[in-house]
């Protein structure tokens, strides 16, 4: 997992993978977590859940910028 920049999981599995990766490689785990966070549609209740989970895990969320 830590050797790949592109992780191929179903959407929710990516969240689980990010949490596991946090224990192995914090920086990479946060990157994967943020990729997941940015893949969740704004306004969906699940986005609030992910935001709260990030707070509990002490992860700084980064909003994807639209180009």
Image: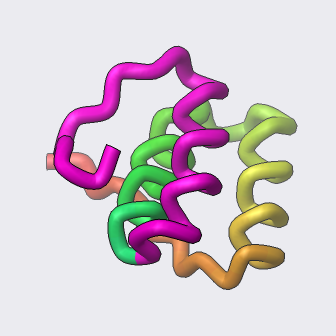
Report whether 48 appears left or right of 22.
right
Quadrant in which residue 25 is drawn: bottom left
- Quick check: is 54 in the magenta stretch? no
Report whether 25 appears left or right of 22.
left
- Quick check: is 15 in the magenta stretch? yes
Q: Position of residue 64 (x, y in %)?
A: 34, 54
Q: Position of residue 38 (x, y in %)?
A: 47, 45
Report whether 35 appears left or right of 50.
left
Identify the residue at image location x=53%, y=16%: 10
Asked if 39 appears above or below 23 in the picture, the reply is above
Q: Position of residue 46 (x, y in %)?
A: 80, 37
Seen from the viewer's position, the closer of residues 6 and 42 is 6
How many tags in the picture?
A: 0
Asked if 58 appears above or below 12 in the picture, the reply is below
Judging from the image, the colouring scheme is rainbow
User: What span is in magenta?
Assistant: 1-26
């Amino acid at each position: 997992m830590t050797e790949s920049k592109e992780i191929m999981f179903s959407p929710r599995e990516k969240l689980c993978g990010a949490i596991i990766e946090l224990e192995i490689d914090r920086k990479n785990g946060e990157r994967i977590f943020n990729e997941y966070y940015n893949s969740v549609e704004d306004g969906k209740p699940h986005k609030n859940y992910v935001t709260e989970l990030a707070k509990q895990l002490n992860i700084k969320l980064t909003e994807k910028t639209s180009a």
